[in-house]
Amino acid sequence: MSTPTLTHWAAGAELPGTGDRFADVTNPATGEVTARVPLASSSDVEAVVAAAKAAFPEWRDTSLARRTQILFAFRELLNSRSAELAAVITAEHGKVLADAAGEVARGQEVVEFACGMPHLLKGGHTENASTGVDVTSIRQPLGPVAIISPFNFPAMVPMWFFPIAIATGNTVVVKPSEKVPSAALWLARLWREAGLPDGVFNVLNGDKVAVDGLLTHPDVRSVSFVGSTPVARYVYETGTAHGKRVQALGGAKNHMVVLPDADLDLAADQAVNAGYGSAGERCMAISAVVAVGGIGDDLVDRIAKRTVTLRTGDGTRGADMGPLVTAAARDRVSGYVDAGEAAGATLVVDGRQVSPDAGGAGFFVGPTLFDHVGTDMSIYTDEIFGPVLSILRVDTYDEAVALINANPYGNGTAIFTNDGGAARRFQNEVEVGMIGVNVPVPVPMAYYSFGGWKNSLFGDSHAHGTEGVHFFTRGKVVTTRWLDPARRAELPGGLNLGFPRND
């Protein structure tokens, strides 16, 4: 049986690649190659961007009422077929079906937020700002926009951006990770079924050639990116150098502080959930638990007892945790476990010894727990992006906050405590963009905005929420005077070269 070859998507239809480069798409649970994806050539970039450019004038001038109807139709279709999309995600990323379904649901929240765009795009109006002069503010779309999304959330991360971009009148080119291309193509077909005009939503598959093509193309007006910090910095610097708006969300090292007064069972449950969910391949994963005071031994024991109960295996077989996305990712994470052990950290649970419930040669590392981790160890300093949870011990709250604030990342953090004063102080003092209080993964609802501080964000704009609406639009202010024939004699006349005053 031959391996199917995927395509790009442009102008409402499949677009075969014109280049001779392809990448394998694999099922991470089995190691099986399930498809080939074309890696875009420069000609492919031109064709897909041209489709978005051609569709923009008509979509920009489509009424908000009509745009909203299509958004609602897309929402209903996605609700009815969300399990189908979850299965597509599990087959290529490896996360368990329940986790994939949760990803779709969180993306759908942004679709629902975008359904309220007629209200969100309302401008302002001032009558008689000056005598006989009215002032109105409006927001208008940018044009074709690009979304470069990561492998770990093939549906949710693109949905942080494209519902708002489309609802505000832009056309979209999504460049998914070549590791997980099928979700974006599935969404393209769903948009067509919902009645979206051809060319408003497009998919460009590829690698760095595709990324650089979008970053430098003169017809692409903005770029939204989520990925590692080095690439986020490159995307931001390259895109802005070519005159584009760029929001580039980078990496993370998320800490969870546990104070002595916390409910330690709750803290242990949530450390395991947030550390090992999606095999740790989340930018909001908790990878460092900071035990404050004398609770370290007790907390580590509780986390370890929960960790060893987790079932690792094929995400379609009822496992708690699935594989890593590729063999290279598996080997990278295993290398960090080796390094942590060599550096002197205490290896409490060794995920390298896992026996997964899966057929074939999947890419598995089991849940791994380290204790007595130092801040100079690579398992702490680096974003591992795998199921490796590190326990650090400090004596005081102040030491915990200083440790977090010294870290170059500032994406998410959490504190577990029953002291409201301590929690309030923490949210004020910690230098991180998203904070949870007894909530380990503080991903905001769609009507708030997602984004971190420091090396976790490049650009001034966060994802979705009102910041997303502003990112995908630009403002105009219109000042008007309409002459009243009955009062024409009262208007000032003649020549006056002085700067106009508002009287």
Image: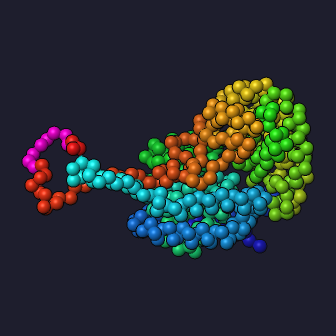
Q: Quadrant of the C terminus?
A: top left
Residue occupying image coordinates x 83% and y 60%: 314
Q: Main secondary structure of the magenta part?
A: loop
- Give how far across and how far down residue 74 sits, in percent: 58, 69
Asked whether 385 or 160 is in front, the reply is 160
Q: Residue at x 59, y 47 (%)?
A: 450
Tell me, yes or no, if residue 206 can be seen here: no
Question: Per the image, is 263 magenta?
Answer: no
Q: Residue 31 or 75: which is nearer the viewer? A: 75
Specify whether 217 is left or right of 137: right
With respect to residue 3, does 380 lie above or below?
above
Which image quarter is the N terminus in?
Answer: bottom right
Q: Residue at x 62, y 52 (%)?
A: 445
- Which of the 4 image quarters holds residue 20? bottom right
Q: Is residue 166 left or right of residue 228?
A: left
Q: Residue 132's x, y, as percent?
A: 21, 53
